[in-house]
Image: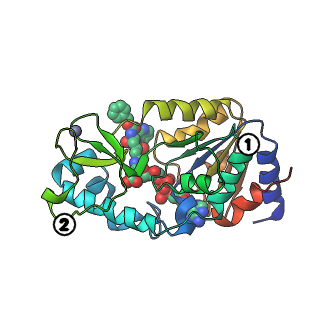
Amino acid sequence: MRDSEADKARSLVERARRLVVLTGAGVSADSGVPTFRGEGGLWKRHRPEELATPGAFDRDPRLVWEWYAWRRERVLACEPNPAHHALADWCRRRPETCLVTQNVDGLHARAAEAVGAVDGRLVELHGSLFRVRCTACAYRAAHTDPVDATALDRLPRCPDCGALLRPAVVWFGEPLDGGALAEAFASASGADVCLVVGTSAVVHPAASIPLATLASGGIVVEVNPDATALTPRSEVSLRGRAALLLPGILRRTR
Ligand code: BJW
Ligand code: ZN
């Protein structure tokens, strides 16, 4: 990557009046959390339609919980990396920034806690590995206890109605939380710069968030080791790892 491109990205972000950031699995790759697609992606071993759909959970809730229990354990063994820390520090200094993540790993929130930042402008579009909701009633809760997915009758149950609990994540074909989606799109439309980090930008509606910034006259700055469908529409597209590039782009200059 040429230095001038990195300098241009840094200057565009620094001078943004309003910044919206969209992150995907790539921002957590350097923490050791596998991405979904591409080399070493989660989907390589598990087809999404087998595990990340409401139909899959109806057919085999034990198998789906086993996958999520494994992912929880993996994420709990990981730490936020310099990209999460750089974003958390930026958001503490510029609290008007809206940080929208597709990730369910909670690493942005953990990085925000580490710098004492309020995470009110953190939008977790696809939910969280560490929350559950009832498959039958409105019960929702934080849930970090280990899940025993060795047998159907050991899976977590709703304390209110006894039905199965499920991970509070958004599966294919499910609607995203209306409030989270509205906040993400309002922020993107009101932003002059959308910084897009570590996402293949293929899953909608999240992939349309940078398009909302473009539609209202703003620009996109992308950070990704590979080109994506968004690359031709980006003012600057930096090829490289988020943990190496973001600390430089978001560094404190005032
Ligand atoms: C690095 C790096 C490093 C590597 N540094 N970078 C419009 C068009 C076509 C289809 C649709 C459409 N609108 C809706 C759809 C259908 C569907 C969809 O988008 N399908 C597409 C795949 C075609 N969308 C939905 O179903 C959504 N729901 C919906 O639209 O509902 C409508 C509705 C309304 C009313 C009633 C009912 C329904 C829901 C989508 C939910 C997505 N869920 C998942 C799973 C979440 C739970 C879990 O984690 O288990 O979310 S799928 C998975 O993909 C996960 C991710 O958040 C999401 C995005 O993936 P991401 O983050 O981009 O990861 P990767 O792996 O794809 O990319 C990683 C990138 O990082 C790569 O580019 C690397 O190069 C890069 N990288 N190392 C920086 N070190
Ligand atoms: Zn219930």
Instruction: Mark yes or no: residue 28 visible.
Output: yes
Q: Which mark is residue 150?
A: 2
Q: Which mark is residue 94?
A: 1
Task: Quadrant for the N terminus, please.
Answer: bottom right
Position of residue 88 measured from the top left corner of the image (x, y, whole percent): 65, 52
Q: Residue at x 69, y 37 (%)?
A: 96
Position of residue 17 measured from the top left corner of the image (x, y, whole percent): 77, 36
Position of residue 188 measured from the top left corner of the image (x, y, whole percent): 62, 35
Is the CB atom of the residue marked by disc 2 within 8 angstroms of ligand 1's nearest atom?
no
Q: Quarter-wise, where is residue 126 in the image? A: top left
- Cα gap from disc 2 to disc 1, whole angstroms: 46 Å
Which is nearer the eye, 124 or 93? 93
Query: Mark 1 or mark 2, which is nearer the start of the sequence?
Result: 1
Q: Residue at x 21, y 37 (%)?
A: 136
Ligand 2 - quadrant of the structure image: top left
Give the class, few, some or many, for how many residues have Cα within 10 Å of label 1's Cα (few <14, many ≥20): few
Q: Residue at x 28, y 61 (%)?
A: 147
Q: Secondary structure at mark 2?
A: loop
Position of residue 40 measured from the top left corner of the image (x, y, whole percent): 45, 70
Vertical side of 233 occupied by 111: above or below: below
Left or right of residue 223, residue 29 in this image: left
- Kind of residue indicated by mark 1: Arg
Give the class, few, some or many, for how many residues have Cα within 10 Å of label 2's Cα (few <14, many ≥20): few
- Kind of residue indicated by mark 2: Thr
